[in-house]
Amino acid sequence: MKEQLTKNDVKKIEEEIEYRKLVVRKEAIEAVKEARAQGDLSENFEYYAAKRDKNKNESRIRYLERMLKTASIVEDHSKSDEVGLNNLVDIYFEDDDETERYKLVTSIRGNSLDNKISIESPLGKAILGHKKGDRVLVKISDTAGYYVEIREIIKNTDDQEDQIRSF
């Protein structure tokens, strides 16, 4: 799957890869060595746990490197009156008669429990590039959808503490 990442996302992923290679990998290898030194490996839980942690770290490194290799870079700025990445958007849902606030983010930062919606989600795709007051159809499938209205756009609220999701 080709991820859409901002330059800031790429920087954070590169930092995580470097940290995992230089710090976590070294600690994991040391933990495996210590567990192996305890003798009989057939019933050595510490050895298997250390190996599992080491393999998990290596898997995460490969995942992040593959993500960077296949990613496309998207700009995180938009016109002053349009919905763009890292904007907070107040959206009125006509069917529910409710207004909700969402932050529009890239897919790796998406977290519906934290009201962060991906630009690749149906709602994110629908509102991206629209203006305050626009009534937008959110298509769920070819035959289903719903209307929302963009009530407010708060520009560039990129949090420096946002972390990349781990699996």
Image: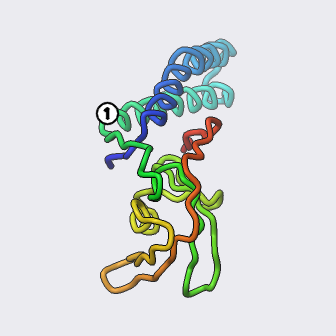
Query: Taking 107 as reference, is 66 above or below it?
Result: above
Q: Nearer the viewer, residue 11 or 102?
A: 102
Tell me which residue sits at (58%, 65%) in the image: 152
Specify the quadrant of the image occupied by residue 100.
bottom right
Spot occupied by residue 96 in the image (x, y as percentages of width and height): 61, 85
Residue at label 1? 69
Spot occupied by residue 26 in the image (x, y as percentages of width and height): 57, 14
Query: Taking 60 as reference, is 112 above or below it?
Result: below
Left or right, 80 with reference to 163: left
Left or right, 43 with reference to 87: right
Q: Nearer the viewer, residue 3 or 31?
A: 3
Tell me which residue sits at (42%, 39%) in the image: 6
Q: Which element carries disc 1, helix, strand or loop?
A: helix
Q: Residue furthest front?
A: 80
Which amino acid, by three-letter code, is at mark 1? Answer: Lys
Specify the quadrant of the image occupied by residue 113.
bottom right
Q: Nearer the viewer, residue 38 or 79?
A: 79
Left or right, 47 with reference to 129: right
- The reply to whether residue 111 is visible in this rendering is no
Spot occupied by residue 68 in the image (x, y as percentages of width and height): 37, 34
Spot occupied by residue 2 in the image (x, y as percentages of width and height): 32, 47
The total number of labels drawn is 1
Specify the quadrant of the image occupied by residue 111.
bottom right
The quadrant of the rendering that contains the C terminus is top right
Q: Residues within 10 Å of mark 1 (few under 14, many from 20)?
A: few
- The reply to whether residue 53 is visible in this rendering is yes
Q: Nearer the viewer, residue 29 or 131?
A: 131
Tell me which residue sits at (57%, 43%) in the image: 158
Query: Taking 25 as reference, is 123 above or below it?
Result: below
Tell me which residue sits at (55%, 85%) in the image: 94
**By what rule are the colours in the image chosen?**
rainbow
